[in-house]
Structures are given as structure tokens and as C-alpha cells.
């Protein structure tokens, strides 16, 4: 079998997965592999899987099968979170040739080179599964910087793993214990991406607020943010996501006073009812979350918030849902990611009784989405006639400092920060024209 060097990637799930795929893709570029689109014919297909929901699992399986149909003689590799937690399940998929867990996927190129050699020598017996215990990973795994597919923005991973074990969440079994990146390595990578011309840096992790908890030095997320904001040439900094109980006074102060720290936060909220939050094993109550979010909104009026919400958690009664509905209506997030609860194997919540029916979950999600659409549109309308700064990405689209998606008329610039005046809103967008300064 004469296996060539055309390789295609597909990434499911979070920004951490995207960061890792970008780094791995760069490794293959440096080894003279030809990177092709996933829909093209390739010799090797790599799917970086996700397992946060049942839907993610199904999509991972579908893509693994689809890859082999593109080229029956290709090598199809599953890596990532679903590969880590469900390797034996994936091994039963005949189209999959190799499965690599999260601990070793940073060294995937060595494994693929070995597979290519074995196949060229017509050695057929290749063990499919290369997955080890993720909890044996004690230190943060460094990935070499890889160009993000988003030209203007780049992700920088600073943390991995989670020790919280929320009752609904499978991710600790996929990512292992909390591990923080060395501050010096973070600073070096930031300097590198600034030199490469990236305007916006997004600090990401599985549980960003836990940064530093495993390090001997007395350092936390706020220290990272402060150090990164001091680096010359850094124009925009964002956090990937954060829990509402991690909104410290110092974090609020940094966002308020540092011009290159953007006034936007994505809140990993999950619910707005104390009873459900307790069942979820979250470490805050409804009132604590409300208090912290109101505090940061008061301190930074231009700040916009987005959030994740799970609807239909086991035991969620109508009054519990109404508390979440009221929470959303009170805080007024600029955008909301709403997910129906789904059982994940080996989690505490999967054994809970009083499951909510599909129909009720659907009705509640529809009700919440109608509310959020109205809130989002009202927020956008407040910007009509105002000036905003937009980082242009492609085809005239970009994002404001507080993360409102914007279309700039008659504008094809990329990787530029433009000051525009908002003229109108249209289909979930701010629409404006460049201000001539």
C-alpha cells in the first residue's frame, strides 16, 4: 500500500480542541504533508472528537465513517475527548484505523509515521487503541504554536483538566486533573503571536478560573491576564469562558482599567435556579451568581455578557425553569448558548430520577430562545448611531470590543481594527460604515 502525505483534519467541540488541532496541523506542515480540506480526498483523516453531549458523540461517529468513504484506502484516526473516554466503542467502527487519547495526541505525528511505515511494509496487525489513563497526566502538555484558521484572532491554551466533577459532566474523565501552563511559556507564545501579526488573543482552558491551583508559585488567572496585557503589541485580550464565582475584584478591575482587555465575558452559568445548581454540583447559588454579574455590569457599563445554559436537567420543575427564565431576563445576556440536558455515562446525574421529557425540554428551550432573541435585538438597537471599534476578519464581518458581530459595508479589509458608526441592525448583526478619521 503506497500511502501518500495528503492529510485532512476536522475538529469538534471547544476552543481547546481547536487550539490543539491547529498545533498538530502545523507539525504536519513542517514535515511536508499537504493539508487538504476534510471534504477532499486525503490519505489520512484526523478527527479531533468531542464528548460533551450525546450529539457530539454521534457527530464524531458520523464523521469517522464519512472520512473512509472519501478514500477507502485512507487511514482514519480518532483522537480527542470521545476517543479518550470511549475508545472501545470507537474501535468497533470498522472505518476507524487508529484511536489516540488526549494524553498522547500532541505526539500524533510520530504515531502516524509509524503507521505509514507499517502499512508500506504490508504489516496488517496494528493495534487500534493508543489510549492511556488521562489521570496519570500530572503536568500541562505543551503544544507548539500553530496558526489559527481565524486570521485576526488566535487561541492560547493556558490550562487543562477539571477537578469539579459537576454531576452532568463527562469532561474530567476526558481531560483529567487540573493542570496549569507555566507563565513564562504563556508569555513566550503571546510574544510569538504578536510578532506573527495577530491582533486578538483568547486565553482558553477547560476550567480557566482554576489556573494556578496546581502550581507551587502563588499565581492565578488574574496574574496571567495582567502579565499578558503588559506585553508590547497586544491589542486585544479575551478570556474563553469563566464561572460566575470566579469574578474577583481584581479581575473586574483589570477589565475595567486595561484598554487591551476586552469588555466581554462568556459565563459558564449552566442554570439560574439554586436547587438545580445544587443538583448539578455547581459551587455557587442563584443569588451569588446574580450578585457577581450585577457587580461587574455596574462597574463596566460597556461590558456585554454571554452564557451557557442547560435546560431540562433531571428534577427541573416548572418553577425551577421560571427562575432560570427570570435570571436571563434580569441580567440580559447579549447571546446565549442553550443546550438540552442529555445523560452522559458514568456521571452522577445519569442516575438521577425525575427525567424531563423531550417535549417539555423542547418547549422550555423555545420559550427561552424567544426571550433571548428579543433581549439580543434590544441590546443591538442600543448601538445604532454610536461609534464602535471592530476587528475585521473576513468578507466584511468582524467583532466589536464587547463581542457583537458586525458587518461593515463596502469593506473587505482583514486583520484591521476599524472605527465604525452603527447604522442599523440586521439578522443578528450590527451594520455600519467606516468612520473617516
Image: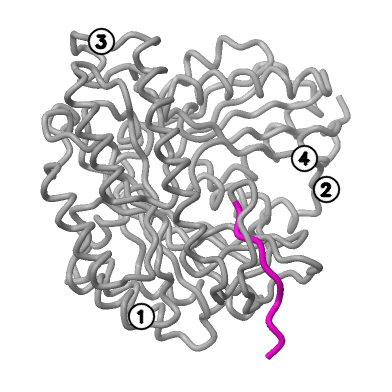
Q: Is residue 364 above or below residue 409?
A: above
- N-terminal of the pair, mark 3 or mark 1, is 1
Q: Nearer the viewer, mark 1 or mark 2?
A: 1
Q: Residue 253, how many percent across, how many down? A: 25, 77
What residue span does the magenta drawing correspond to?
429-437
Relative to 31, residue 237 above or below: below
Local crowd size for mark 1, using a 10 Å CA cut-off: few (<14), some (14–19), many (≥20)? some
- First reached walking from the N terminus: tag 2 or tag 4: 4
Separation of marks 2 and 3 at Cα, in angstroms: 48 Å
Distance from label 3 to label 1 (Cα)? 46 Å
Per the image, the residue denoted by label 4 is: 7
Front position in the image: 3 or 265: 265
Q: Does residue 383 appear left or right of residue 46 in this picture? A: left
- Which quadrant of the figure has residue 323? top left
SS label for mark 1: helix
Please report the residue visible at 58 percent of the width from the left and 48 percent of the height from the top.
428
Above or below, 127 against 407 in this view is: above
Q: Is residue 133 left or right of residue 373?
A: left
On the image, numbered disc 2 is attached to which residue? 34
Crowd around label 2: few <14 · some 14–19 · many ≥20 (10 Å): some
User: Do the numbered discs 2 and 4 sit on residues whose CB atoms are within 8 Å?
Assistant: yes
- Circle 2/circle 3 CB separation < 8 Å: no
Residue occupying image coordinates x 11% and y 42%: 285
Which part of the image, by quadrant, shows the N terminus?
top right
Towards the viewer: 26 or 304:
304
**Most common SS among magenta residues:** strand
Residue for badge 1: 227
**Residue under pointer 3:** 355
Looking at the picture, how far across and down is residue 320, in whole percent?
18, 26
Amino acid at each position: 500500500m503506497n500511502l501518500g502525505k495528503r492529510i485532512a483534519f476536522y475538529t469538534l467541540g471547544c476552543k481547546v480542541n481547536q487550539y490543539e488541532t491547529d498545533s498538530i496541523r502545523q507539525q504536519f506542515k513542517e514535515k511536508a504533508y499537504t493539508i487538504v480540506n476534510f471534504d477532499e480526498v486525503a490519505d489520512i483523516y484526523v478527527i479531533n472528537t468531542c464528548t460533551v453531549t450525546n450529539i457530539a458523540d454521534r457527530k464524531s461517529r458520523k464523521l469517522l465513517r464519512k472520512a473512509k468513504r472519501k478514500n477507502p484506502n485512507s487511514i482514519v484516526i480518532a483522537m480527542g475527548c470521545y476517543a479518550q473516554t470511549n475508545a472501545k466503542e470507537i474501535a468497533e467502527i470498522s472505518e476507524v484505523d487508529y484511536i489516540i487519547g488526549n494524553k498522547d495526541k500532541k505526539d500524533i505525528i510520530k504515531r502516524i509515521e509509524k503507521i505509514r511505515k507499517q502499512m508500506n511494509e504490508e504489516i496488517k496487525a496494528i493495534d487500534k487503541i493508543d489510549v492511556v489513563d488521562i489521570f496519570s497526566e500530572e503536568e500541562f502538555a505543551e503544544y507548539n504554536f500553530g496558526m489559527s484558521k481565524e486570521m485576526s484572532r488566535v487561541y492560547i491554551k493556558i490550562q487543562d483538566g477539571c477537578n469539579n466533577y459537576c454531576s452532568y459532566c463527562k469532561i474530567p474523565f476526558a481531560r483529567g486533573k487540573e493542570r496549569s501552563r507555566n507563565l513564562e511559556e504563556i508569555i513566550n507564545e503571546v510574544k510569538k503571536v504578536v510578532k506573527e501579526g495577530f491582533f486578538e488573543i483568547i486565553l482558553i482552558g477547560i476550567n480557566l478560573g482554576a489556573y494556578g491551583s496546581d502550581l507551587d508559585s502563588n499565581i492565578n488567572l488574574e496574574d496571567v491576564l495582567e502579565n499578558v496585557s503588559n506585553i508590547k503589541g497586544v491589542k486585544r485580550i479575551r478570556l474563553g469562558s469563566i464561572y460566575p464565582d470566579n469574578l474577583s475584584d481584581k479581575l473586574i478591575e483589570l477589565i475595567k482599567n486595561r484598554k487591551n482587555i476586552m469588555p466581554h465575558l462568556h459565563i459558564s452559568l449552566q442554570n439560574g435556579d439554586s436547587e438545580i445548581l445544587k443538583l448539578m454540583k455547581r459551587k455557587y447559588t442563584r443569588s451569588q451568581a446574580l450578585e457577581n454579574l450585577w457587580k461587574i455590569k455596574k462597574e463596566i457599563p460597556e461590558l456585554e455578557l454571554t452564557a451557557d445554559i442547560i435546560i431540562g436537567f433531571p428534577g427541573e420543575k416548572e418553577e425551577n425553569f421560571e427562575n432560570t427564565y427570570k435570571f436571563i431576563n434580569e441580567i440580559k445576556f447579549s447571546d446565549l448558548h442553550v443546550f438540552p440536558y442529555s445523560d452522559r455515562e458514568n456521571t452522577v446525574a445519569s442516575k438521577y430520577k425525575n427525567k424531563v421529557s423531550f417535549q417539555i425540554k423542547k418547549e422550555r428551550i423555545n420559550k427561552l430562545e424567544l426571550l433571548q432573541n428579543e433581549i439580543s435585538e434590544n441590546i443591538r438597537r442600543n448601538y445604532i448611531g454610536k461609534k464602535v471599534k471592530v476587528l475585521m476578519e473576513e468578507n466584511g464581518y468582524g467583532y466589536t470590543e464587547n463581542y457583537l458581530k458586525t458587518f461593515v459595508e463596502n469593506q473587505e479589509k482583514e486583520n484591521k481594527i476599524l472605527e465604525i458608526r452603527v447604522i442599523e441592525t440586521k439578522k443578528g448583526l450590527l451594520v455600519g460604515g467606516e468612520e473617516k478619521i
